[in-house]
Amino acid sequence: MLLNQFLILSAVLFSIGVYGVLTRRNGVMVLMSIELILNSVNINLVAFAAFREAIPGEVFALFVIAVAAAEVGVGLAMVLLLYRNRRNIDLAGIDSMKG
Amino acid sequence: MIDLLAATTSSVTSIPLGITKEGNWFLQNAWLIPLIPALSFVGILFFGKRLPRGGSELGIAALLIVFLLSICTGFAWMDHRDNFHGEEISQTLISSEHGEHGEHGEHGEHGEHGEHGEPSLAVVNTATWFITGGVEFSVGTLVDGPAVMMLFVVTLVSLLVHIYSTDYVAGDRRFTHFFAFLSLFSSSMLLLVISENTLQLLVSWELVGLCSFALIGHWWEEKDNSNAALKAFLTNRVGDMGLLIGVTILFFASGEMIPDSFGSFSIVTTNALASSGLLSHSTLLIAACCLMAAVMSKSGQFFLHTWLPDAMAGPTPVSALIHAATMVVAGVFMIARLYGVFFEGFSIGGSSINLMALIGGFTTLVGACLAFVQRDIKKVLAYSTISQLGYMVMALGVGAWTAAMFHLFTHAFFKACLFLGSGSVAHSVHSFDMKSDMGGLRKVMPQTFRTFIIGSIALAGLPPFAGFWSKDEILAGTGGWGILGGTNGNGSYTFMLIMGMITAALTAAYMTRCVYLTFFGEFRGHGHPHESGPRITIPLWILAVLAIFAGFLNLPKGFQLVPKSLQERFGHYVEPVAGYFPEIAHATPSWSLAIVSTIVVIAGISLAWNYYFVKVEKASKESGKSLTELPDGLTTRLTLARMGHTLLVNKYYLDHLYTGIITRAVKEPIAELAYRSNQEILDRTVDTFGRTAVKIGQLNYEKIDQNLVDGFVNASGRISSDSGEELRKIQSGKVQSYAAILFAAATILAGLLIVIV
């Protein structure tokens, strides 16, 4: 069982996701990066589930996919609203919650 | 915990309760009867407005079902009463120095009950409601003679009132609301009559009070109506305190006799203990006095009766159902239910006067006198109700239990008939005022007129109408008729007999007046009155027929004109012959008393007839107007009569007494005292405290507050302010910088995890 390879793949995906979240200015790109993070987690879950021959991990992954879909739905709606109000989706310009 | 064991199982002393758990399906499942109208209440409340007839059809259907159920229960009970030979349940007692238990038990089974033959075993079913602190609170049904009788009366009158109301309140803006409350009322009243314990009785007692409040104030837009509703509610509160205290006393009193228990709410157990003389007399007397207060408020006994006439502010069907036929007899029913307590507490047997008989007798006279001076037809009937309720309480007070129940039974029919008749009249002339808006209605409203006459004769008590039989049984039951063929009752209550006789004459006279003012002479109102529709007249006729024939259910024993098997049927099936009922003696009916009371009634009618049908009629013809009284009557000629009239018009000044004198007398000295004690004692104390406090405070302020506390507070404030100033830099408002912090923190934690693990 090649567990390591999966874990490495997942770690790489996760890092790319984090990098995307932190550096991208475009809201849609940030959302896509979050998807990457979530899917790296899914790969982890499924890999461990297959390795330990335990079903719950796979079930959990399914849940994550469903939740991710909902999250992207909400996120895209927010991006859409941003675009409508500001004519761009640059996250750097959004700091009205500044303390 | 109530410990019920069969009598044979132990050597511990026990008394037979006269109840059983077995019986016909209908007797076992009496709980369905209050449940169905309760469901109908909920149904009307939620869906009533959407139904084609505004929810009234739900109410009528529910009442029809429970009416049929009640009839089945009645027949089941009659069969059970005669043919049931099952196991009787006994109550285990603390075996102590009460050596006479066994003797009492024996006495209960073979004593005077032999007069009625076989004992009747009530069917009791209970379920645990909740247990707290070792006390079990149960709910259940106690089905016996009086309960079955009341089920029949309540469901029948309620059903007829429902049908009548569909016409009477048609088009009302709260039509649905009205029917919802009628259903709730029926449900709570039915719950009350089959209550197994005093707590359940108390709950349903309050529930009927609530429904009464809501229905009196049905047209609350007018201030008078909402005031009347409040008055009824608050007056009933006064009595309810008595009920609460009485129930509590009985709970603990019976607990002393039952092993391993604080007390018992069970009506049967309490009654059985009281009837067999196991509870102390003084306890029972106090409990009975407290319960009597509840009866006085609920059943409109003098001097807490003042709410009942005002309650006529409600719609007429409500007056018929609640304030004449069913709810107001809840008090009478409660006495009948806990009769063991009252019988022993007031020492009814072998006495010649007691509190209950006196209150009842006085009420019956007071109410009858007040009925003479009313202009409002419903108020005449309201005072008549007070008077008749007084009759019932008096009957219970002299030990004539069956007579009281029988009078309750017949009264429900003819009084409901009269009330619905007055409603029919008012529906057509749009007023309740007999003097200014009625008169001569016999020609235009023949159906209402005939039923009203039947109801009036039944109320006045002329043979062979229903009222005669029940009234005469009460008069015989006083045991005061010693001169001619004495009627040996529970004592010799001659005083009560005289009061009853006078009331009989007064009742006959005021009903004659009422009938004359409403139906004879010429029409004095406006518009064109017309006969009411079938939904009003059919219930009237049903009640009128019952007002004629209901009296035959309890033909007196020894009434030679009918076979023996038809005598005292009502008494046989309704009166319990069981361990939970005291051994009461039964008066023998007397022909001479019946004849004399009939003569008294006829005398009352003739006097009123002479005044109204002869003199007033003649004066009307001469003056060409429809008069309601003689222009030169007694009240204009005699000062004493005028004073009496004024006293009656002002309702004995009781309302003045309550609001003007009692309330003020209580309020003002208390206010004065309160003011003084406030100024002299409280204020000075407070002042001293205050001054000392100021000094301490000053010291406190200078030393502790300014230096220590303030320093601490200022320091903490400064720290939070400074740290806040630093920390707000992190709050950039940018999502990505938050994300960076999050991931940095996660990385650090992950690192820590690896290092530590």
Image (cartoon, rainbow, N blue to C red):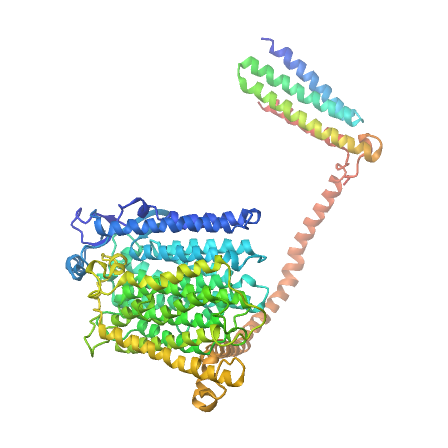
Q: Is residue B163 above or below residue B688?
A: above
Q: Is residue B461 above or below residue B756?
A: below
Residue B259: x and y in percent read 25, 53
Q: Is residue A98 visible?
A: yes
- In this rendering, position of residue A78 left or right of residue B341: right
Residue B286: where, in percent of width, then height? Answer: 32, 68
Examine the rendering and report whether any part of residue B496 can be seen. Answer: no
Which of B679 and B596 lies nearest the eye of the viewer? B596
Q: Position of residue B733 (x, y in %)?
A: 77, 36
Q: Nearer the viewer, residue B432 or B180?
A: B432
**Is B237 rendered above or below residue B201?**
below
Q: Where does the C terminus of chain B fall, quadrant-wise?
A: top right
Q: Quadrant of residue A28?
A: top right
Looking at this view, is B334 or B439 the one in front? B439
Pick out the residue farthest to the top.
A1
Relative side of B267 to A95, left or right: left
Q: Position of residue B473 (x, y in %)?
A: 27, 68
Residue located 47% across and 53% down the image: B183
Residue lying furthest right in this view?
Answer: A87
Residue visible at 48% across and 57% down in the picture: B535
Q: Residue B710's image quarter? A: bottom right
